[in-house]
Image (cartoon, rainbow, N blue to C red):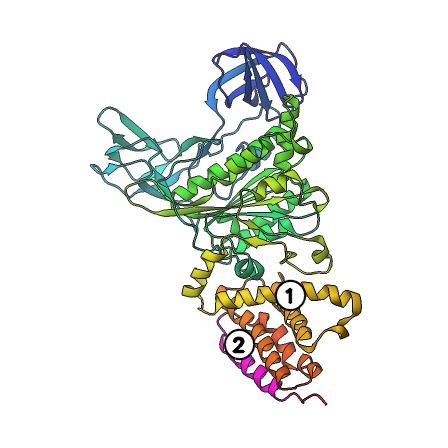
Amino acid sequence: MQEGTIIKVSGPLVVARGVPDPKMYDMVKVGEELLMGEVIELRGDTASIQVYEETAGVGPGDPVFSTGEPLSVELGPGLLTSIFDGVQRPLDIIRERVGNYITRGVEEPGLSRTKRWHFTPTVKVGDELESGDEIGDVQETPTILHHVMVPPGIKGKVKRVEEGEFTVEDTVAILDDGEKEHELSMMQRWPVRVPRPYKRKLSPDIPLITGTRIIDTFFPVSKGGTACVPGPFGSGKTVLQHAIAKWADSEIVVFIGCGERGNEMTDMLLEFPELDDPHTGESLMTRTILIANTSNMPVAAREASIYTGITLAEFYRDMGYDVTLQADSTSRWAEALREISGRLEEMPGEEGFPAYLGTRLAAFYERSGRITCEGCKEHIGSITAIGAVSPPGGDLSEPVVQATLRVVKVFWGLEDKLAFRRHFPAINWLVSYSQYTRKMMEYWDEDVDDEFPALRNEAMGLLQRESELEEIVSLVGIEALSDQERMVMEGAKSIREDFLMQNAFDDADVYTSLRKQFLLLRLIMVFYYEALKALEEGKAVQGIIDAPVREDIARAKYIPEGDEDRFDELERRIVEQLAAVESQV
């Protein structure tokens, strides 16, 4: 490696002169301890470098060594079940080697060089392959079959391929393109800031079913979609993301703890290996990659962590898997961006964030999507990107929230007031929205029930009407409302308490299939329609409100999956009981 010289140190920012042939985003080694860094600005013969480790003890005159390569990650079997920091150093391996704290300058490859994997070819000698084509399989975990692919930019005829036990660096196949022979191993390297190639992007018209009723019915996200989860401290952002990671019908989970508090990340690192995957019965970690970059870790590594995470997600997307990527929280990532920008003495934008904040956020979220993968045999994969935002004081007008909302299609607005009232998930149904709803309605109509779209719209209208009536009630009391308006309040209350609220500690209520969501919502709306009919017939409003079947409706969400007959029975009881209500005197 050739050498440059440090002329200035400002926290994680190091300025060096004489770095040979520098290029933007090249990796360098800083100081005698060879700290990991990345070139982020070039001015004349000086290069500004963000260092991913603590720079105490580094000073002017110390050397800088160029690697000539950008920050890249290793892709191959062994990623799943792993816990990495923001630049793909395996934290469990480093702990065994140096203890509980990462020693400066410590290096460890992202993938083990000693573990052997059983490679089973899926091609034979003489086959013509393109980039993205599968050459063989490795059983990476009990639940995930890892497809070893031809790296991007390589194609040719299979000259040699063999089955056996190999490390990730061993050659498992040789391709001949007529001019050159390419030795292929089970490992690829890819620069994190460059999106991986694909054939074409597809319409996001298939829902990501999370089992959370307020999301799936009212504010759905599609496979390959983007969602923003802003909310103040204590409103349940992390818990909601954990629930989606566990229950959503995706095959791979990439969770990025980006600048979160250390105790939260510790809880997650301890809990995830203990959780059972409800889809397979195995540990949830068998299909999960964790990237832990807590708030006390170097700020520059926090900025790189979301790129590391989405590159790992793209790798499994290219195999044809549906991937859920959770970033918690992009506010901490934006703060890292602001700190680095300030040390570069760039012109600050709103609230000190750099002017390119929106561009960087858009570039991250645009790497999501449902796509047709490269290769001769077309297969489909997706990345659904869900980013939590932690605005100071819950202020949704702050720059990170607004820049995020300009590029994502789903907004789940968490509210601490709902959380304090023990309404979970604490998503405010009046401010949240989803731009995928129209496409999801076509799916509901065909795959769930043709009544579902209209029922969902009527229920949403009832909740909005309730918010208007609450202003009247707060001023002059419930007695000022007409009987029909009182039924609007009762119907909306039933939707809020019996449908939107979910109990994460109840096995029957923690996850709700789309079919059960439809039946439960129809049950609530049948009561509302029958109540209006009873009012027209002159029945007493208090008798309708006090009908015994109301308790059965409240308990309906605990009915086990597949027991549809009980919903039909409850609907019959609603009709019978409201017909028996006495008329007003």
Q: Residues within 10 Å of mark 2 (few under 14, many from 20)?
A: some
Task: Name the image quarter holding the C terminus.
Answer: bottom right
Percent position of residue 297, x then y:
64, 32
Helix, strand or loop at label 2? It is helix
Answer left or right for 360 relative to 176: right
Q: Which residue, given by chain and number where applicable, does mark 1 sit on?
A: 465
Q: Amino acid at mark 2?
A: Phe
The residue lying toward the viewer, choosing from 62 and 244, is: 244
The residue lying toward the viewer, choosing from 29 and 585, is: 585
* Quadrant of the rendered image containing residue 466: bottom right
Q: Which residue, given by chain and number where applicable, does mark 2 sit on?
A: 567
Q: Residues within 10 Å of mark 1 (few under 14, many from 20)?
A: some
Q: CA distance from mark 2 to mark 1?
A: 26 Å
Whether the residues at callouts 2 and 1 have beta carbons within 8 Å, the answer is no
Q: Which residues are magenta?
A: 562-580
Magenta: main secondary structure equals helix
Percent position of residue 86, x then y:
56, 34
Query: At 34% across and 43% down in the image, what residue appears?
Result: 137
Look at the image and tell me whether residue 13 can be seen.
Answer: yes
Helix, strand or loop at label 1? It is helix
Look at the image and tell me whether residue 90 can be seen.
Answer: no
Is residue 407 shown in magenta? no
Query: At 68% across and 52% down in the image, what residue appears?
Result: 235
Answer left or right for 84 relative to 169: right
Q: Is residue 124 above or below residue 225?
A: above
Work out whether mark 2 precedes mark 1 in sequence or the reverse, and give the earlier one: 1
Is residue 579 shown in magenta? yes
Q: Is residue 62 above or below residue 488?
A: above
Percent position of residue 58, x then y:
65, 16
The residue lying toward the viewer, choosing from 6 and 479, is: 479
